[in-house]
Image (cartoon, rainbow, N blue to C red):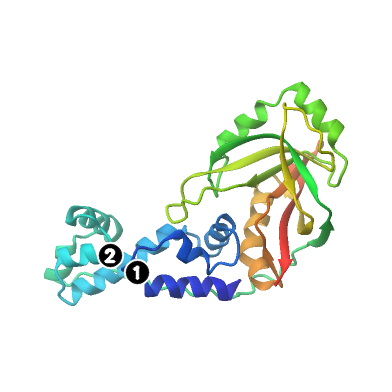
Amino acid sequence: MLKELNDVIDYIEDHLTEDLTLETISEYAGVSDYHFRKIFFYLSGMTLSEYIKNRKLSEANKDLLLGEKVTDVAFKYGYQSVDGFTRAFKKWSGFLPSEVIKKGMSKSFPKLSFVITVKGGTAMEFRIVDKPAFNLVGVSKRVPMQFEGVNQEIVKLAESITEEQRKEMHALQNIEPYEIINASYDADANFLKEEGYLTHLIGVLTTENQISDRLDKVAVEACTWAVFPNEGPFPSTLQNTMARIYSEWLPSSNYEVINAPSFSFTKMDKHKKDYAYSEIWIPVRKK
């Protein structure tokens, strides 16, 4: 994964003055678009669109220092108007493009390079599980993509589940893990802007195919899963584990994510406030 990430960085660098499309970037990633964006975000601390914007404006700053005209630089890096470029540059740097030319003011944002850094020596528990084909069944909804914080649309989805739906899910559940799971899949391909929606499903795993129209069904092919158990304060422990999967485990493992729904479940501790055991299930294959 580190090689693929650095290949993408090199590709972006070579095409900063061109129209960077989803298709041309994602072919370097080796994983689904949504998973790649998550890996990039957790490793770099910024979205892909933020990185590209910062690199374009940094290179624009260099060109202005070399004496290129503001108009030429604006159109070179894909801005539709000088005003649009000037606003973006001022917001990014704190000064106007004209001040770069007149006063030599400068700000830079260097190219990223991904490397593995060992931090703290904290072991990460995981297991590899091969599962036969199954169905995810439950209630689902298109919700806004959100990499951080509580997604209020998912909260509303959970609150919408009826007693009849709960009973049917319980009756259908016949394959591990025997828990209510949260799954995400079918992310929109608005890759560079980090916008759009994905489908979120709250439900269970089952091998049954006869499902009523009260529930949605998603078929999942037989594959391998990397399972990450975690226990501690909720939701911080779950969120930290997810971050470590994408920033530490995946880049250094012999596995890569495949394009299938990932899911998780959480069991709250009845005796400890805001404390839970969770598992995160990521679909993978050996490189």
Query: Residue 264 at x, y = what percent?
Result: 72, 47
Query: Residue 181 at x, y = what percent?
Result: 74, 41
Using the image, tell me which numbered label, if any, was put on residue 129: none
| Residue at the image point whose x is 63% and y is 62% from the top | 246
Q: Is residue 12 left or right of residue 164?
A: left
Q: Residue furthest front?
A: 210
Q: Earlier in the sequence, mark 2 or mark 1?
A: 1
Query: Residue 254 at x, y = what percent?
Result: 71, 73
Specify few, some or many for label 1: CA neighbours under 10 Å numbering under 14, 14-19, or 20 or more. some
- Image position of 178 with respect to 55: above or below: above
Q: Which quadrant of the view contains residue 121?
A: bottom right
Residue of label 2: 77
The amino acid marked with disc number 1 is Leu
Residue of label 1: 16
The amino acid marked with disc number 2 is Tyr
Helix, strand or loop at mark 1: loop
| Residue at the image point whose x is 77% and y is 28% from the top | 212
Tags 2 and 1 touching, CB below 8 Å: yes
Residue toward you, 204 or 57 = 204
Helix, strand or loop at mark 2: loop
| Residue at the image point whose x is 55% and y is 38% from the top | 143
